[in-house]
Amino acid sequence: MAYSLSHQELISIAGEFGTPVYVYHAEKIKEQYEKLVAAFEGCNTRFFYASKALTNINIVRYIDSIGCSIDCSSINEVRIALEAGVAKENILYTSNGIDFSEIEAAAGYGVHINIDSLPNLEKFGKKYGHGYPVGIRLRPNIMAGGNLKISTGHDKSKFGIPVQQLEAIKKIVAEHRIFIRTLHLHTGSDISDADVFVKGFEVLFDLIPSFPELEVIDLGGGFKVPYVPGEKAIDLRVLARKVKQSFDDHQLAGNKSLQIWFEPGKFLVSECGYLITKVNVIKDNSDQVFAGVNSGLNHLIRPMMYDAFHYIENISNPGGPLKRYNVTGYICETDNFATDRSLPEIREGDLLVLYNAGAYGFEMASNYNSRYRPAEVMVREGRARLIRKADSFDDLLRNQVLLP
Ligand code: LLP
């Protein structure tokens, strides 16, 4: 794990902006993007940042500025990308379970679209015929990903059109002469095994001859990053080599050169993010010691939602004697950030930092218990700047309608 902001920098940001606060280090995102580009050098590859991981408009704009395209999972993410100044050619909308009107809206913006159901494909064909090149999201029936909640390509998953419905897809495509430019799949998140992508690829290869106008194979996101010390990220060079090999092993009709798209979310923004919290209270219950911080599952739901591990440091007392703690939040239900974790002695007022907080951290935050969502700060070229204010009491009431 390579975190790039020092304790001193984090302490100074906490002093300037208060806590809890999310901090993102822009250059770390660039470093991750450059790893992708370097690993796939020589392959005809394009990367779309899965912006659902972190949609702050400044982050989306920064990622666009380093040459990475943007993947969206809702029409509002498309709007955020457009608002950030991303060109429509560099925006992809991978839909799932949506009303056709959202696809029409996306088509109105002229972005790339992946369609994930037969009914929407049919409606799309009726409305756009051959005029709007489009992608189909398929379900490859492959089990992958860190846990079932984030596994999306298996044979019970709601995502995509099952590959066994190929004949139905072909019928709709033929009837409306739909221009199928892309075949897409996404099997899950936290994938460490490069072979998963190869397997996905193999499934798609069998389908390629059915779509003569095909230009793109989109293999989705899911590249694993380390969360637990000692854990390894997916080996990109192995992945790139295997993907290239699969391509070379398959003869494509007419010697066609397909482009490969990926949609990394965590890989780009997980490690750039830090959640800095302050210890409110120490409860020594003799058998367990609780360090209660001024945050909770309302700010970072991953530990409670996925049993996810987030590395924690006590940046106020890094050299203190190690003791065992349950680090908990202030939400009125069980919200452990860490259970029985060995940490340098924690005192009231200490700053605890949760690492890997960039992806699906703020993005999944809520106002549960009528707590405020925290501020977000971006560090770029050594300068820390506020990119979202913390909520205020007015925000909690903003859309409520008080009846007379
Ligand atoms: N493409 C599609 C179609 C996706 O559904 C996703 C994630 C991605 C790309 C990006 O996956 P990534 O590279 O970030 O693994 N909230 C969960 C993760 C949910 C992922 C949803 N889809 C978590 O915090 O672990």
Image (cartoon, grey):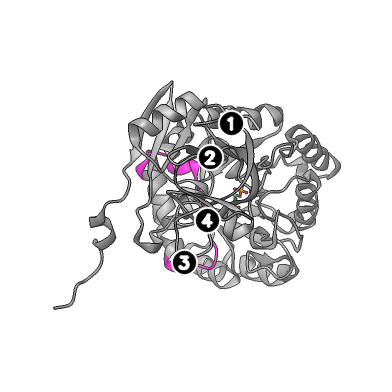
Mark pair 3, 4: CA separation? 40 Å
- The span picked out in magenta is 83-101
Q: Is residue 311 left or right of residue 69?
A: right
State the SS at label 2.
Answer: loop
**What is the crowding at mark 4: few (fewer than 14 residues within 10 Å), some, or many (at least 20)?**
many
- Whether residues under marks 1 and 2 lie with C-beta atoms below 8 angstroms apart, the answer is yes
Q: Looking at the picture, tell me which residue is in the foreground, 29 or 183.
A: 29
Position above or below: 295 against 174: above
Which residue carries the number 4 mark?
A: 301
Task: Specify which label sits upstream in the sequence, 3 or 4.
Answer: 3
- Whether residue 134 is visible to the viewer of this picture, yes or no, is no
Residue that appears at 43% across and 62% down: 104
Mark pair 1, 2: CA separation? 8 Å
In the picture as drawn, the residue positioned furthest to the top comes out as 381
Which residue carries the number 2 mark?
A: 346
**What is the crowding at mark 3: few (fewer than 14 residues within 10 Å), some, or many (at least 20)?**
few
Place of residue 97 in the rendered image (x, y in percent of width and height, measured from the top left) = 53, 68
Q: Is residue 210 left or right of residue 48?
A: right
Place of residue 148 in the rendered image (x, y in percent of width and height, measured from the top left) = 69, 62
**Which amino acid lies under the numbered mark 2 shown in the image of this protein?**
Ile
Asked if the beta carbon under badge 4 is closer than 8 A to the nearest atom of ligand 1, the reply is no
- Whether residues under marks 3 and 4 lie with C-beta atoms below 8 angstroms apart, the answer is no
- Whether residues under marks 4 and 2 lie with C-beta atoms below 8 angstroms apart, the answer is no
Which residue carries the number 1 mark?
A: 320
Task: Specify which label sits upstream in the sequence, 4 or 2.
Answer: 4
